[in-house]
Image (cartoon, grey):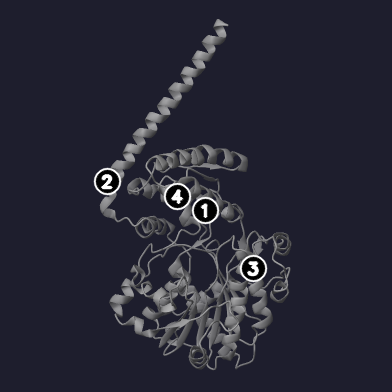
Amino acid sequence: MESSIAGSFENGVVLITGSTGFLGKMLTEKLLRCCPVNTIAILVRGKKGLSASQRVEDIYKQTLFDRLRSEKPDFTESIRIIDGHLEESSMGLSSSDREWLIENVNFVFHCAATIKFNEPLELASKINIQGTENVMKLASQMKNLKGFVHVSTAYSHCPRSVIKEEFYNVPITAKELKNVFFDEESCLKVMEDWPNTYTFTKAITENMILTNGNHLPISIFRPSIIGCTKSEPEPGWLENMNGPTGLVTGVMVGFLRTVPNIGSNITDIIPADYTVNALISVMWDTVNRHKQSNGVPLEEPKIYNYVSCVESPLTWGRYIREMHDQYYVAPPLQSMWYGFYIFYTNLMVGSILRFFLHRIPGAFMDLMLILCGKSPKMLRMYKKTENMIDLLYDFSTKQWTFDNSNSRELWSLLSKDDREMFRFSLDDFDWKSYIKSYYYGIRRHVLHEDLSNVEKATSKNRQYDIMIVIMVALVVYGTNYFCRATFLLDAYI
């Protein structure tokens, strides 16, 4: 057994797919900063007229890499860019790149996927299923492969209420799915109880790995909802509006004013840096398990559920409440209205609230934009945002029971030094400080505001307070006046 996690990567060559995504960038940064790797090969496809090299040109200038840049100024020399396209049978690789990968790669982290819930099934299948199959075929030819970790999702089998670290039956195999005609009726029939194409294709991919992956030193890593970082490389780092981040940001700037009542439900958020540490630890365990088997194929790949609800459950109510506590201290300057929200449990009531709190103000603001000679956008933004909330509805209202025995066992195997460098246990996790970092991370990295504008933002927020008080007073006065006038009219008649 490798004595340390970092030591298992010494002079190794790592292939990362999905390296331009949130998790892929975090993984690249951590490996380069903490592990003595020789080379990290990143598979990137050309897009919108840009080559792979052009696409990644500015990535390593991001603040995510500031700490690494300070500690290892020449870190980019350890990165090799491979131009490739997962969905193509040959992965779009040049013959020289393919030969280099086969001869040199020791570790494969397959993070690439489309995570859009409403991605057409045909495209989601090509990226998530066919893409994984293509990477596995390439890995099977690698002469010095030590480990392969496929990143799935804790919700791959979300139709179940209890999700263990095991394989489950699926309604159709990857091979059978290739022969399906992708019209809307066929897609709904094939997907059965899965609410979206993302989780469905992840489930089919896991089944395909079980069927085709036994000859590989492979494991499956299932993270839940990845949030911002806890501490590495800096607290609160994030870069997108996915999941709860988008919801909170919309409320923070006064854009969203009504949301589903999910307060008592558990939200399975996991810190991004802890997730990367767990992922690297899974690779270490995978390498050790297959080394100990002396080349004899294991019965089936091992699955690791990485979730927070077992050791340290967090409710949506606490998450939103503590976010709002920070809002009172440092509201965003670019807010369009005071940050408030009305919960709804009934979908019909929700539609009514959306009409009055979103559509009417949105139409008014669009009218103002038109009068100012600008293009209307508010109603379009509300439609897009509400569609996103509807897609996430099942995942914010439904509760799951997860088993994470393999992940907890893995933590018990780590040495004291590895637990410090690759911390991922969520026992006694400090959610209060994490949510505070999350709020300021949104403020800095999503809204691009620093703390120098807090005084100005607070003053602006107080003006919104006064405006709301005046509006409420006018509504109460108007309602009272109308009722009195109606009463007097009835008495007169």
Label 1: element kind: loop
Q: Is there a contact, CB below 8 Å, between mark 3 and mark 1?
A: no
Label 3: element kind: helix
Disc 4 marks which residue? Answer: 250
Mark nearer the N terminus (1 vs 2): 1
Mark nearer the N terminus (3 vs 2): 3
Disc 1 marks which residue? Answer: 315
Image coords of residue 189 (percent x, y)? 74, 61
Q: Give the residue at x 44% y 75%.
A: 27
Report which quarter residue 339 is drawn in: top left
Report which quarter residue 22 is drawn in: bottom left
Disc 2 marks which residue? Answer: 456
Question: Who is closer to the viewer here, 292 or 18?
Answer: 18
Q: Which numbered disc covers residue 298? A: none
Relative to 457, residue 214 above or below: below
Q: How crowded is mark 1: few (under 14 residues within 10 Å), some or many (20 or more)?
A: some
The tally of labels here is 4
Label 4: element kind: helix
Q: How crowded is mark 2: few (under 14 residues within 10 Å), some or many (20 or more)?
A: few
- Measure how far apart labels 4 and 1 are at the Cα level: 19 Å
- Amino acid type, residue under disc 3 in the picture: Glu
Disc 3 marks which residue? Answer: 122
The mark lying in front, picked from 4 and 3, is 3
- Amino acid type, residue under disc 2 in the picture: Lys
Q: Is residue 405 left or right of residue 357?
A: right
Relative to 188, residue 79 above or below: below
Q: Residue furthest front?
A: 373
Q: Is residue 277 left or right of residue 207?
A: left
Image coords of residue 369 (percent x, y)? 40, 43
